[in-house]
Amino acid sequence: MDLADSWEAQSRQWIEWTRRPGHDSYGRYHRDQFLQLLPPPGQRTVDVGCGEGRLTRHLKELGHRIVGIDASPSMIAAAREADPSMELRIADAAALPLDDASTDLAVAFMSLHDIDAMPAVVRDIARVLQPGGRLCFAIVHPINSAGRFERAAADAPFVIAGDYLRPFRYADTVERDGLVMTFHSQHRPLEAYFRALEDAGLLVEALREPGIPDHSLSSDASRRWQRLPLFLHVRALRP
C-alpha cells in the first residue's frame, strides 16, 4: 500500500481527529507559525496535499484565491462539504492539474513527508510556479522522525537508534482523548528535501525550526519538545 492509499484508508479517523477543536498542534500554534513564512495573497495559491481542507479554508479567509489538491477522494469530499465554494481537485501531486507558470504561491503544509514521490512533486510545483513565485512547506522535522524520546519526561534522552541518513517508511499510532489515528509517513534526511529543491531550480529564502511555546504545553513532560524541533518550515523561490 502506498502512502496515498494509507491516508485514504485513514481518512475518516483523520477528519474526526483534525476537526475536534484543540485536539492537535495545528490550532494551538503550528498553523500561525507557518503562516509567518507566507507572502501576502496574490494571483493564485495552490494547496498541495490539502487533506480535508483546514488550511485551505483558512487561507481563503485570509484573502487567497485558493485551489486545494489531494489524492484522497474522501478528503476532498470532506473539504467540499465544509466549503462548497472552494476550488478543490482530486489529483496526484506529482502531476498537478495546472498549467505551467500559472500560480504565484504553492503551499505544502505537512504533506511532503506523506507522499512517496516527493522529488517529483517538488519538480511539478516548480513547473506551475511563475518566476518570482514561492513554495512554502512544513514537514515533520527529520530529527523527529529519525528517533524518539526514551520516556515521557521533560529531561528524557532523545535517541536515534537506527540510520538517520536512510529513508524509511513508518507508522505512528496515537490515541488521545478517545480518538485513535495512525500517521503513515516517510522519513527522509534533510538532504533529500534540499536536493529536491535544488534539482527543481528553487532557491531557499527562509528556514525555521519552530519551538513549542509555553502556552501550548499540555504537561510538564511536553517540555521535552522544547529541546528538539517537531517541525521544519521552509520558503523557496522560483527565480
Image (cartoon, rainbow, N blue to C red):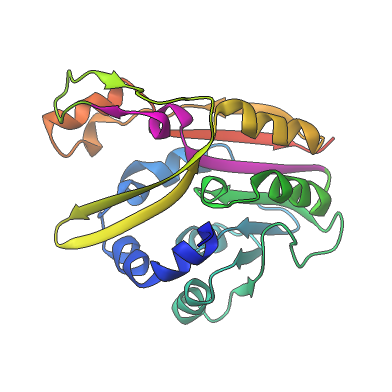
x then y, percent, for residue 141 = 46, 32
Q: Residue at x 53, y 45 (%)?
A: 113
Pick the quarter of the image with the C terminus: top right
Q: Is residue 146 left or right of residue 153?
A: right
**Total numbered circles:** 0
x then y, percent, for residue 130 = 84, 49
x then y, percent, for residue 1 = 50, 62
The answer, for residue 198, to whether it is visible in the render is yes
Q: Residue at x 76, y 30 (%)?
A: 198
Q: Which residues are magenta?
A: 132-149
Q: Is residue 19 above or below residue 101?
A: below
x then y, percent, for residue 49 = 57, 58
Q: Is residue 134 magenta?
A: yes
Q: Residue at x 54, y 76 (%)?
A: 73
Q: For this rendering, which residue is in front, 215 or 139?
A: 139
Q: Is residue 167 left or right of residue 131?
A: left
Q: Is residue 44 left or right of residue 109?
A: right
The answer, for residue 52, to whether it is visible in the render is no
Q: For this rendering, which residue is in front, 153 or 34?
A: 153
Magenta stretch, main secondary structure class: strand
Question: In which image quadrant can residue 99 be found?
Answer: bottom right
Q: Is residue 199 left or right of residue 63?
A: right
Q: For this rendering, which residue is in front, 200 or 26?
A: 200
Q: Is residue 205 above or below residue 155?
A: below
Q: Is residue 79 above or below residue 131?
A: below
Q: Is residue 4 magenta?
A: no
Q: Residue at x 53, y 74 (%)?
A: 76
